[in-house]
Amino acid sequence: MNYYKNTRGKGVKQDNKAFFAIEQIAATLSMLIGGIILFNATDLFGWDLTQIVQFREAFTAPDSLWGWAMISGLAFGLLAFFSVFIFMFKGRTATFAGLVNRLTSLIAGTAATLLFAIVFGGKYPVTEDWITLGFILIAVAFLTKAEKKRAAELKLNTK
């Protein structure tokens, strides 16, 4: 982000949307390439670590309930995807948008864990997870209040 900010001349209008598009494309490609390397790591490097073998078997010999597992992760994926758009609202600062984006990912993770526990009988989030979620929601409330105050101050300064 600083690259985009620091390489523009004075008075040049900044459009940071390109940064977020590049970030999402780079993240997607990195995960895809990393996944392909891990999938083929047993053949390429002779790795036989349990985690890598399980990762490969998830694709080559999936569990019969794989569809339900995918649906349980949908809560995380949808919220994480749409949380990216918070960066694109006019006037958002990286301080606010970055934190809120990460916090929504944590909330989505808790929601996905809860859905997994209900649907598949997995482990429910522990007390610490719920306390952390409470702190996250309190933090979002304070960030929202601060952002509204900042936006109001900007509006006063531009008149």
Image (cartoon, rainbow, N blue to C red):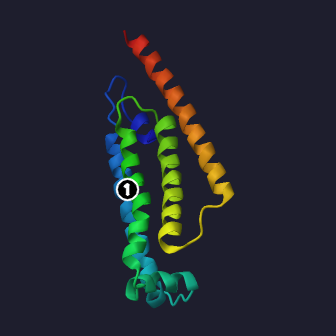
Residue positioned most to the right: 128
List x then y, in percent, for residue 86: 39, 40
Does 60 sit above or below residue 83?
below
Per the image, label 1 sits on a secondary structure element best described as helix
> In the figure, 133 relative to 150: above or below?
below
Extreme residue toward the top, this view: 159
On the image, the x and y values in percent for residue 104 come to: 48, 48
- Which residue in the structure is indicated by mark 1? 78
**In this view, 77 is above or below 37:** above
* Tally of numbered tags: 1
Apparent side of residue 48 relative to residue 80 in the rendered image (left or right): right
Residue visible at 61% across and 45% down? 134
Q: Position of residue 63 (x, y in %)?
A: 43, 84
* Residue pictured at 39% horizontal, 51% vertical: 23
Which of the 4 image quarters holds residue 39? Answer: bottom left
Taking depth in this image into account, of 121 and 41 the one nearest to the observer is: 121
Q: Residues within 10 Å of mark 1 (few under 14, many from 20)?
A: few
Percent across and percent down for residue 52 are 51, 82
Q: Which residue is depicted at the point 36% across and 9% down?
A: 159
Identify which residue, 61 or 67, lies in the foreground. Answer: 67
Q: Taking 23 as reference, is 125 above or below it?
A: below
Quadrant containing the N terminus in the rendered view:
top left
- Between residue 70 and residue 16, name the one nearer to us: 70
Q: Residue at x 49, y 28 (%)?
A: 147
Amino acid carrying label 1: it is Leu
